[in-house]
């Protein structure tokens, strides 16, 4: 009897182990992961900011001060509208300050660039400042002091820099700082709007860390106000494009639906149509017009997943490229194991899971990006190496 029981238990544990490994492997293959220890520094609110708002013909700069034991308060300073404001964003994990100057003048960037300089693209950072910064240092875009070292090159951020992580404020001001630095050297930082930037502009904060709800409350705002019509970061994000062509390649967060090739729109017109709707939640309707098609959460350029979810032919993929005289398209949005080329080198998918600033996970994450030099495409690894695709 004991022998039979022992044998059955052995078979049970073997079967259970095999099934567990199969389920775990299936989950990991489809992007599942286990979150391990989280550093509580992620929720330290002191020095959080700046959160800048336009109020009563003035600019109000807010920082959170204090601690849980003694309480928090809003450190508020008011400036004239035309001020150039010295500011800093504090990264708690390393006690590092990101220093920059804020100009209240915000311009809409061009939709097309032609200059043959190198392009480095990365996407879906999702509020992870440290890995983002370290990756750019490893590949010579900036140095240890956060100064621009990429010359006249193009740094292209292909959407979803916000949400999920606990360093969203730091990531956004870091991008803003790099924009100013790049311009001084003839380079460019391109912030392509992704669906999560749009969600924040719409007041949809359900993918955001809960710490930002508390931060908004301390500075006297609702969470949705952090990127609202009167916030500096909100207005800055609204100025950004959803699609750009740089040296003959398209950069867009989701992708180009083949039907867009049938529309009589330029890139500039598409960007303006989508920009006009950044703050309007939209749900697909049966007989959508062309403009509604462009802002749909299924078919719009910031949302489309057809390269990975639909049974597209090579011809259908190339329709969207030919429409805008592009040789390839670079996209984020849909998670990959690694940066890769698809559809005979017409589509480059660069969304990978980047490390979280304050939380480890299994399987471990590592950052990747894409470098384009002349006609060569390279997969970039987080240790500073590159592989020809």
Image (tube, rainbow, N blue to C red):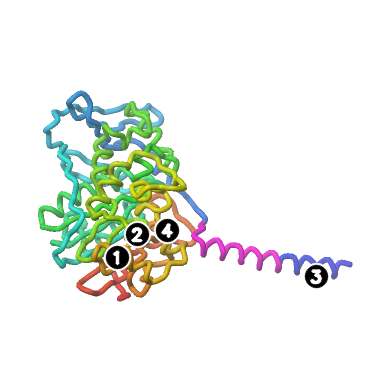
Chain-order first, disc 4 or disc 1: 4
User: Would you say the residues marked 2 and 1 are in contact, meaning their CB atoms lie under 8 Å apart?
Assistant: yes
Chain-order first, disc 4 or disc 3: 3
- In the image, residue 56 sits, relative to residue 341, either above or below, namely above
How many C-alpha atoms fall within 10 Å of the one at disc 4: few (<14), some, or many (≥20)? many
Secondary-structure class at tag 2: loop
- In the image, residue 42 sits, relative to residue 330, either above or below, namely above
Identify the residue at image location x=23%, y=60%. 245
Say whether residue 127 is visible.
Answer: no
The part of the chain drawn in magenta is 14-33
Q: Which residue is mark 2?
A: 256
Say whether residue 163 is visible.
Answer: yes
Q: What is the CA distance from the residue labelled 2 to the residue labelled 3?
A: 58 Å
Residue furthest out toward the top: 56
Q: Which residue is mark 4?
A: 305
Q: What x and y, as percent, mark residue 151?
A: 13, 62
Magenta stretch: residue 289 in it?
Answer: no
**Nearest to viewer (mark 2 / mark 4):** 2
- In the image, residue 55 sits, relative to residue 295, either above or below, namely above
Q: What x and y, as percent, mark residue 248?
A: 22, 66
User: Would you say the residues marked 2 and 4 are in contact, meaning their CB atoms lie under 8 Å apart?
Assistant: no
**Nearest to viewer (mark 2 / mark 3):** 2
Q: What is the CA distance from the residue labelled 4 to the residue labelled 3?
A: 49 Å
Identify the residue at image location x=15%, y=54%. 182
Q: Nearer the viewer, residue 306 or 115?
A: 306
Q: Is residue 224 left or right of residue 174?
A: right
Identify the residue at image location x=37%, y=46%. 292
**Residue 321's disc number:** 1
């Amino acid at each position: 009897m004991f022998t039979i029981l022992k044998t059955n238990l052995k078979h049970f544990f073997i079967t259970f182990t095999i099934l567990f490994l199969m389920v775990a492997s299936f989950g990991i293959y489809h992007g599942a992961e286990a979150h391990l220890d989280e550093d509580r520094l992620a929720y330290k609110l002191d020095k959080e900011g700046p959160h800048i708002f336009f109020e009563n013909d003035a600019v109000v700069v807010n920082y959170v001060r204090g601690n849980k034991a003694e309480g928090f308060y809003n450190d508020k300073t008011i400036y004239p509208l035309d001020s150039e404001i010295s500011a800093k964003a504090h990264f708690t994990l390393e006690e590092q300050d990101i220093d920059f100057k804020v100009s209240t003048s915000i311009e809409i960037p061009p939709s097309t660039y032609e200059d043959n300089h190198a392009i480095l693209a990365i996407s879906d950072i999702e509020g992870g400042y440290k890995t983002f910064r370290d990756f750019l240092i490893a590949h010579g875009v900036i140095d240890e002091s956060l100064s621009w070292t990429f010359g006249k090159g193009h740094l292209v951020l292909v959407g979803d820099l916000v949400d999920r992580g606990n360093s969203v404020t730091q990531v956004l001001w870091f991008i803003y700082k790099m924009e100013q630095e790049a311009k001084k050297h003839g380079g460019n930082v391109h912030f392509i709007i992704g669906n999560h930037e749009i969600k924040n502009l719409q007041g949809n904060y359900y993918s955001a860390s809960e710490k930002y709800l508390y931060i908004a409350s301390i500075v006297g705002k609702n969470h949705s106000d952090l990127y609202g019509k009167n916030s500096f970061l909100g207005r800055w994000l609204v100025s950004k494009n959803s699609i750009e062509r740089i040296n003959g390649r398209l950069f867009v967060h989701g992708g180009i639906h083949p039907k867009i090739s049938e529309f009589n729109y330029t890139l500039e017109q598409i960007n303006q149509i989508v920009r006009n709707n950044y703050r309007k939640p939209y749900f697909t309707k049966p007989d959508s017009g062309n403009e509604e098609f462009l802002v749909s959460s299924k078919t719009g350029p910031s949302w489309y997943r057809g390269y990975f979810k639909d049974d597209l032919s090579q011809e259908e993929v190339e329709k969207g490229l030919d429409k805008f005289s592009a040789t390839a398209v670079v996209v984020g949005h849909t998670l990959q194991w690694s940066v890769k080329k698809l559809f005979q080198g017409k589509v480059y998918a660069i969304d990978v899971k980047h490390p979280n600033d304050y939380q480890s996970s299994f399987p471990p994450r590592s950052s990747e990006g894409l470098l384009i030099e002349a006609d060569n495409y390279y997969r970039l690894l987080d240790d500073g190496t590159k592989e020809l695709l």
